[in-house]
Image (cartoon, helix red, strand yellow):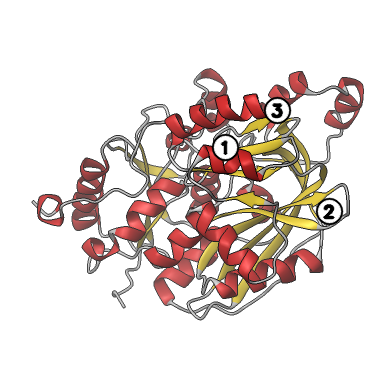
Amino acid sequence: MRKRKNMRKVLVTDAQHRAALAIIRSLGRKKFKITAGSELKSAMGFYSKYCTEKVVYPNPKRDPLSFLKKLLKLVKTKDFDCILPSHTYTMLLLCKYRDIFSGYTEIPPPSYDIFYNAYDKARLLKIAIKNGINCPETYFFNDLDEILSAISRYPVVVKASKRHGVGIAICKTKSELKEKYSEMVYRYGDCIVQEYIPNGGEWGVYTLFDYNSKPVALTVQKRRRTLHHYGGASTFRETIRNERLVKIAFDLLKKLKWSGVAMVEFRIDARDGIPKLMEINPRFWGSLQLSISSGVDFPYLLYRLTTDKKITPNLYFREGVQCRWLAGDIVGFFHSSEKLNFIKDFLKLRTKYDVLSLSDPKPFIISVIRPIKGSGDEEPREDDPTINIKELMK
């Protein structure tokens, strides 16, 4: 274990994302010295009053070698306690090349192999199905003709196997599947095809597991609204208890031998009321601020786990806390078919906000003036890059 300093210093990457802003604010309120990093000069996290230093680094999707070189140079000179990433691909790189940072700083768990089992949807679903967890019927064939011959009912959904936060393709006919599957594979690489699950409610189990794969923190959120009618990123959600989903999520994460933060996503099948596993987000989630507002400070808890290696479990969270991603909710309004009900609900004032903050207003202003389009997962990249370590250490 590295020697702890008097001044707690953390590098928060991916400062353009809402989750990174929540981390910066959470730890900043506890008097941490926060260095925020991003490939974008206009990252909203740079403008938080809790950001003490900002670093623009090479785009990790386009140039992972230069990105890792920049971070390695930083940690050699700045003496950070740990690096806290909030984007899936950044987490992938840090997990895979964890050893190069050893002796300079700490990288949060899990190990690379365990991370990859959640990162790759095909691997994850195979593990879940093997362990009796309900999932959408999934076609794992790599050959489109085999997929087409196996499907007897439409609509179906095409999803990128190793991307998180990108659009999905809903296909209502065989010809539509042929066209959209080829497009998705061209854009995102390996894809899976699943039956479409009619939306009877979308839930997430948000948790932190210790190094012994035991849960130490928890919130459960129900999505009230999403960016699109078919789902996608949540724009308005609420904390609600659901012991059934917690048990399923915990059982799955234990099977994965998980450690670190994770969000396990479910959709309730409107046909039979059975929750179906959608995916695991193996990093901090976009609605992180709601978890913090409900009394569970995941950024600080992950910091403690990463630096101290052990924390005391506490699975309590406040129910009925609501939180809104204001920009996303406004965009969602234009996609909504029930605009009157949307407006009535939107005008309710007892809610928290992901980005908007009267005490820290600049990130919201920047997010409006210079909005970030997409999640960054739409960019071309290698899904599992191999980097020459000798070149990296130069």
Q: CA distance from mark 1 to mark 2?
A: 24 Å
Percent of width and height locating residue 38: 37, 38
The earlier-in-sequence mark between 1 and 2 is 2
In which quadrant is the N terminus drawn?
bottom left
Q: Secondary structure at mark 3?
A: loop
Residue 29 seen from this side: no
Image: 299 above or below 363: below
The earlier-in-sequence mark between 3 and 1 is 3
Q: Secondary structure at mark 2?
A: loop
The earlier-in-sequence mark between 3 and 2 is 3
Answer with left or right where residue 157 lies relative to residue 184. Answer: right
Q: Residue at label 3?
A: 173
Front-lying residue, 363 or 142: 142
Name which quarter of the figure residue 301 lies in.
bottom right
Percent of width and height locating residue 36: 38, 44
Amino acid at pointer 1: Asp
Q: Residue at label 1?
A: 360
Tag count in the figure?
3
Q: Are marks 1 and 2 in contact (CB under 8 Å)?
A: no
Q: Disc 1 or disc 2, which is closer to the eye?
A: 2
Q: CA distance from mark 3 to mark 2?
A: 41 Å
Q: Residue at label 2?
A: 320
Q: Disc 3 or disc 2, which is closer to the eye?
A: 3
Amino acid at pointer 3: Thr
Amino acid at pointer 2: Gly
Name which quarter of the figure residue 116 lies in.
bottom left
Percent of width and height locating residue 391: 11, 50
